[in-house]
Amino acid sequence: MDYKNFIGGAWLATAESTPNVNPSDTTDILGHAAKGTVADLDRAIDASHAAAPEWATSTPQQRFDVLDFIGTEILARKEELGTLLSREEGKTLPEGIGEAARAGQIFKFFAGEALRQTGDRLDSVRPGVEIDITRSPVGVIGLITPWNFPIAIPAWKLAPAICYGNTVILKPAELVPGCAHALVEIISRSGLPAGVVNLVMGRGSELGPRMIDSDKVNAISFTGSVPTGRGIAAACGANLKKVQLEMGGKNPMVVLDDADLELAVDACLNGAFFSTGQRCTASSRLIVTEKIHDQFVATLYDRMMALKVGHALEAGIQMGPVVDQRQLEQNLSYTEIAGKEGGKVLGGQQLELATKGFFMAPALISETTNAMRINREEVFGPVASVVRVKDYDEALYVANDTEFGLSAGICTTSLKYAQHFKRNAQAGMVMVNLPTAGVDYHVPFGGTKGSSFGSREQGRYAAEFYTTVKTAYTLP
């Protein structure tokens, strides 16, 4: 299949294309994706800019109808879209279908938000003067999305952008063109005017800077790596362009002596290894108090090694492949580094299975300190490290001793420690007796420190980025 760009309401091919490779079976080519150029992007920017005035003044009913149509079709086709996702990105089939369903739910949520408008009407301190405080669309927004959630993350950027009257250019990750194409194909039949949503696939290093530099693009929403995010923030700042960044995590899961061991192991197994660990909210640092440490490591290791790794579409598979060869090599490199620094590496080897793919066993690295690279840098794979600590106070200190601050968790039966951790963990999201990964679609998503910059994504808080506040005074 050819995955084309969608610009100004038309599907357009490009002179060059790139193959879309199944990470579970590299002989399986799903199709070929358009390799957009700067000229293609300029056409998309112009189309978005031209469509912005009309869509900014669209009615709440128009926006509801569009978003509800999209959400309804995604949910009706969640098995089909989930299969595409799993084949393209490598999530297990249940995970792929679950992500597709979440995308549909996101559009349904923002369909409702299109009708649930809010504002304020106040009396001025000056007699007889009335004040209206309303929200207006930002304008043209560039959306740059990653490969690890190839339909959910585009959904949670596209849906609020459309809901609040903006026009967009979606630039998805090169590894996952199929999901972006399928999503925009549904959007193209939703009744949106031409130019409101545009899709441009191609190299981020070429298209990203142009999108940021264009004076017709009013805002950028980016999800991806910390170095790229920092560069985008600097460039947007220089251009006085609104920016929203969701970046990395080195998320701690604290396990105290009083924790329910089975519950804690379940939470860590899910948080660290499901979705092949390729989640910015993954539990990558397991901080365990000393009395329970050895038993916890032994139990988690047994559970981890029992996980069934294989082709994402096979029944019963619990962990699919890594997304590509580059990511696989990075994961293996980090486990090697951890071993050289004194960690005890359990599992983590590359696997040769029935199909040629990017498979590795999950890795658990014990006997680490928080100063090791494995605990300072994001790996983004099925790799978790364990840090032994004396007590809760040391656990909290270690949990917060990181440049990241996306998600943090604690497993404990103590209400005292749970409440203290929720207040004092330096993270945007905190979980008690739950995995650090796995969040609802109707509440805000985001972190602190080096993990996020700008206003939150998802839920009603998305309005903070996708709108601007207007204050109007009237003397009747």
Image (spheres, helix red, strand yellow):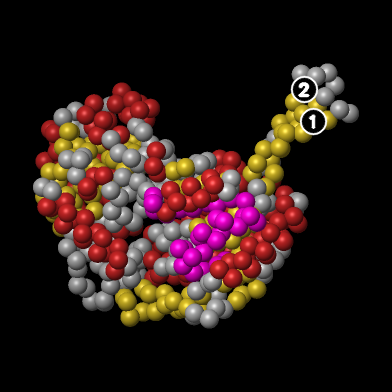
Asked which secondary structure carries label 1, the reply is strand
Cα gap from disc 2 to disc 1, whole angstroms: 8 Å
Q: Residue at x 50, y 74 (%)?
A: 35
Name above or below for residue 415 compared with residue 345: above
Residue 347 in the image: state x and y as whole percent: 15, 58
- Circle 2 packing at 10 Å, graded few (<14), some (14-19), many (20+), is some
Q: Residue at x 55, y 52 (%)?
A: 220
The three-letter amino acid code for the residue at tag 1 is: Tyr
Q: Is residue 289 left or right of residue 453?
A: left
* Badge number at residue 473: 1
Name above or below for residue 346 compared with residue 290: below
- Observer-nearest of 253 and 224: 224
Location of residue 405 (image quadrant)? top left
Q: Is residue 292 left or right of residue 393?
A: left
- Judged from this view, the residue extending furthest toward the right is 476
- Circle 1 packing at 10 Å, graded few (<14), some (14-19), many (20+), is some
Identify the image quadrant of the C terminus. top right
Name above or below for residue 125 compared with residue 303: above
Asked which secondary structure carries label 2, the reply is loop
* Badge number at residue 372: none
* Badge number at residue 124: 2
Q: Is residue 187 left or right of residue 288?
A: right
Q: Is residue 316 visible?
A: no
- Observer-nearest of 415 and 385: 385
Q: Is residue 444 visible?
A: yes
The three-letter amino acid code for the residue at tag 2 is: Ser
Residue 267 in the image: state x and y as whole percent: 29, 45
| Magenta segment boundaries in residue numbering | 199-227
Q: Residue at x 55, y 55 (%)?
A: 212
Q: Are marks 2 and 1 in contact (CB under 8 Å)?
A: yes
Residue 137 in the image: state x and y as whole percent: 67, 47
